[in-house]
Image (spheres, rainbow, N blue to C red):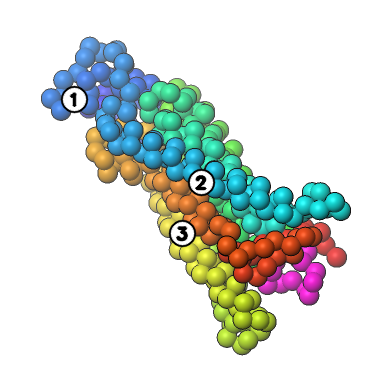
Amino acid sequence: DFYPGTDAAKDKPWNSTDTYLPLCNVPYMPKGWADEAGTTGPIGDCSETYSVSYGAIHRILGVFMMLAYAVFFSLLFTWYRASRSKRKTKNTPHPPYTATEKFYVGSLIISVAGFICGIDPLGVSGVIPNWIYSGLLGVQGAGVNIIMVLMVMNWIAIMTARGKDTSMLPWVRNTFYIGVAASMLDFFVTFVEEFTVPEIDGAYDGTVNGIKHFFLGTLEGGFCVLGLFYALKMKRQIASGGTGTEKQKQQVNKIVKYNNVLIVCGIIGVLFRYSRTALRVGTVVYPAPSCSTVGFIMGALVEIIVMIVVFAVVLAQRPSKQKKIRPHGETNVSTTMATTTTTTTTT
């Protein structure tokens, strides 16, 4: 067994809340443990890493992540610079950020963190220290949630706009701030988790992790409900002809489609987080290596989901060939997504 433990813990589950001391610290394992013949080296020889048991799939995912995020970053940064430069004027050298530009910035930060994680997916080769990898993963998780909050609240701000006044209503503004602050917990808790079980390198308290996932799952579910409510409201406006011109109707239709995708992804995220809560509360989580490709992919679900989300943002926010950004933040309704500038001031 890979978890022989100590004499005091040999009759207890390896993931019990009692202290359990494996032979090697993460991400190292006894030499030869991953061999098909089952041969192992002398006790105390921790010269092999988990990546040996994962084999080629670990390297393949790493290369794919770095290439994908490099492409994402290049495209997003190019579009971001083009958008900012076109909107600058002598009177407004630093125009307010549009929703699209905020998506760009958030996705750029996620892309940088994701590229670094691609150097050593799951942090199992000993290249990236476990606590640094956890911090990078927290940045990605928080970034994805903030993009979700920004997307939903921007749509709500558009739907609740009072004529030409695009400032957020007080409840919209407060909900936005609460959503962003709550999303940041993903980073802080994921980082701190790595120090909750100091006796075992790489292990963390499953109860802390489970509470985090329950809280964030509830947050994501709440914003999915908000998104669904306003998506249905948009559809009713389209049906009643209350959205103005045909081009504006097409734009609202696009937003509704993106919102539906967001809801589907949100449901998957909620189920993922609640399953983690159910499985981890009351345990000590120790990242055991897998000897199968499926096991590795299941362990890398977070990295894969984040990469899919950034890819979706790239597709959704790519500039249209017909797009023309006018001075002072005015936008053409034929853009791929709404670029309305919303402010957090109240009137």
C-alpha span from label 3 to label 1: 38 Å
- Write down the residue under mark 2: 72
- Report x, y in % for residue 345: 81, 59
Where 291 sits versus 266, above or below? above
- Write down the residue under mark 1: 35
Where 141 sits versus 29, above or below? below
Whether residue 338 is visible to the viewer of this picture, yes or no, is: yes
SS type, badge 1? loop
Q: Going by the image, does 172 lie left or right of 199?
A: right
Disc 2 residue type (three-letter) = Phe
SS type, badge 2? helix
- Write down the residue under mark 3: 265
Q: Residue at x 46, y 59 (%)?
A: 265
Q: Which residues are magenta?
A: 156-171
Question: Is residue 166 located in the magenta-colored stretch of the structure?
Answer: yes
Question: Is residue 126 located in the magenta-colored stretch of the structure?
Answer: no
- Report x, y in % for residue 108: 58, 44
Disc 1 residue type (three-letter) = Asp
SS type, badge 3? helix
Whether residue 106 is visible to the viewer of this picture, yes or no, is: no
